Image (tube, rainbow, N blue to C red):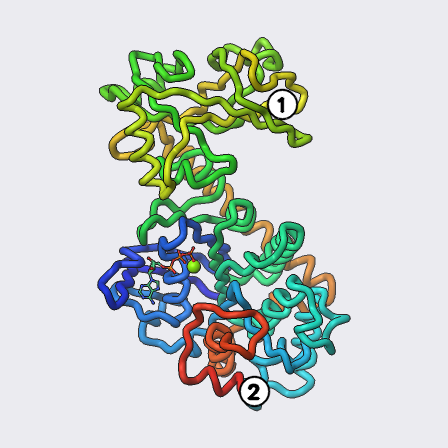
Amino acid sequence: MASITLNHLVKKYGDGFPAVNDISIDIADGEFIILVGPSGCGKSTLLRMIVGLEDITDGDLLIDGERVNDKAPRDRNLAMVFQNYALYPHLTVFENIAFPLRLAKGKHSEDQVKKLVTEAAATLELTDHLQRKPANLSGGQRQRVAMGRAIVRQADAFLFDEPLSNLDAKLRGQMRSEISQMQRRLGVTSVYVTHDQTEAMTLGDRVAVLKKGELQQIASPRELYEQPVNLFVAGFIGSPSMNFLPATIDGTTLKTALGDLEIPQDRARKAAGKKVVLVGVRPEFFEDAKLVEDHKRANGSTFTATLTHTEWLGNEQYGYINFDPAPEMRELLNSLARDMDADELRPQVVVTLDAASRIRGGREAEIWLDTRKLHLFDAETGDNLTRDAEAGAELTREAAEERAEEIATAQEAEGRGNGTGFGSGSGNGASGGTRTGDAGAAHEDGATTTGRATGGTTTGGATATSGKHAAG
Ligand SMILES: Nc1ncnc2c1ncn2[C@@H]1O[C@H](COP(=O)(O)OP(=O)(O)OP(=O)(O)O)[C@@H](O)[C@H]1O
Ligand SMILES: [Mg+2]
């Protein structure tokens, strides 16, 4: 178990392109950090810098306070699980999991190996499959074998690079909750790269949003969702995404393509001096005006719109409203789209309606909007003018407290259960002697995907050492 500190980390590849540009993050011991951002923003690069598969161009990387920039991967004692996990087809599940232990030659007795593998297999519900070969397993089972390998290594931290992206939706959900519970039980520091909104929002204690190599914001999922620092974070976090409506502002009135919206004075004051703003409205701020109780109605604005169509999802419905922005506003939307890495930002608003709503496409309807919650963004800089930093920080503080409690509860339960929990202290990462073999295997996981592994190809850090291990 370890804390990891990224101090102004920079990665420039051979062509001078800064894939990671001055990123600083303090990862606490036992914390679960998620890295998200559009394709190419530097997530994998950052992860590979931490694990040691990629050189650090500038800045410092500290593990438990010790600078490790120049340490080989095998000396960092971190375990990495890749998107295309490499399993050895000729080895049984048992031996695949035991692999890192075998690599640390002579370090573990046969009894120890058996105990560690059996325990990991129980955690991952692989007990019945230990004698099978990877080819006969489902995708999810293979994924779990790869995880088992990381577990037996007793690494100081787990690093995941989109580990679930090859699985179907149902398995993903299942694995997600398994990883979450396992992380709590082991209390092991984890850094997890994903594209998946749900994974980002549910797994992480804090989520770091990256754009073009730069850190935009790192905070608890709730803080990102409720108090984003800028347009980019606001648009990236949440599904369906936040709607952005160009508006001119006149006192407490926002003139938008949907009509005039009255906003609370304190919100309006934050945008004082701006002529044009982008109004950020989450779909769930809208409701069918007919279904809004009278006492709530005063908290918002009601407008008339014709929905193009609705989608009924059982528990709620999505409605779609097209709007026609003025030409100069259209340009604003286009530049916003470029900024968000989208081809175009459709002049469309998505609203969430109660499942009981009878509003249907093609007919005029009254829609209510809760104006207390909307955010106003600077049309030029993208900064969130209405962000309440203090309220945001409080959300993240609460999340940190919850995490501490969850870990304590999970480990207590584990201790009561069988007394041999992986997270229960003794030997976990403390034994410096295991390091060589352990991280050597971490390295090799990424590297041996050429042909002999079942996982397919990866961008693993192929090095000379890897082939040897794989040849066994
Ligand atoms: N070996 C390399 N040589 C040169 N440039 C690279 C190399 N690897 C990555 N890059 C560049 O660095 C940037 C970040 O790449 P990285 O793989 O870290 O992105 P990512 O956020 O993981 O993307 P994805 O979500 O698609 O996996 C990209 O612009 C990429 O082109
Ligand atoms: Mg990547």
| Circle nearer the N terminus (2, 1) | 2
Residue 148, percent across and down? Answer: 62, 70
Would you call the spot at circle 1 few (<14 residues within 10 Å), some (14-19), or many (20 or more)?
some
Residue drawn at the location 49% of the way across and 11% of the way down: 304
Tell me how many marks there are. Answer: 2
Distance from the alpha carbon under mark 2 to that under mark 1: 60 Å
Q: Say what secondary structure mark 1 lies in.
A: strand
Which of these two is toward me, 288 or 429? 288
Residue drawn at the location 37% of the way across and 45% of the way down: 217
Q: Is residue 67 left or right of residue 440?
A: left
Q: Say what secondary structure mark 2 lies in.
A: loop
The relative height of residue 244 versus residue 224 in the rendered view (above or below) is: above
Residue 321, percent across and down? Answer: 49, 22
The relative height of residue 349 versus residue 70 in the rendered view (above or below) is: above
For disc 2, the marked residue is 107
The relative height of residue 299 versus residue 216 in the rendered view (above or below) is: above
The quadrant where residue 147 appears: bottom right
Residue 117, percent across and down? Answer: 67, 76
Residue 221, percent across and down? Answer: 48, 42
**Quadrant in the picture for the C terminus:** bottom right
Residue drawn at the location 38% of the way across and 31% of the way down: 388
Residue drawn at the location 47% of the way across and 84% of the way down: 467
Mark 1 and ligand 1: say if the CB distance to the nearest ligand atom is below 8 Å.
Answer: no
What amino acid type is highlighted by mark number 2? Answer: Lys
The relative height of residue 86 versus residue 36 in the rendered view (above or below) is: below
Would you call the spot at circle 2 few (<14 residues within 10 Å), some (14-19), or many (20 or more)?
some
Q: Is residue 104 left or right of residue 51?
A: right
Q: Nearer the viewer, mark 2 or mark 1?
A: 1
The quadrant where residue 356 appears: top right
For disc 1, the marked residue is 354
What amino acid type is highlighted by mark number 1? Answer: Asp
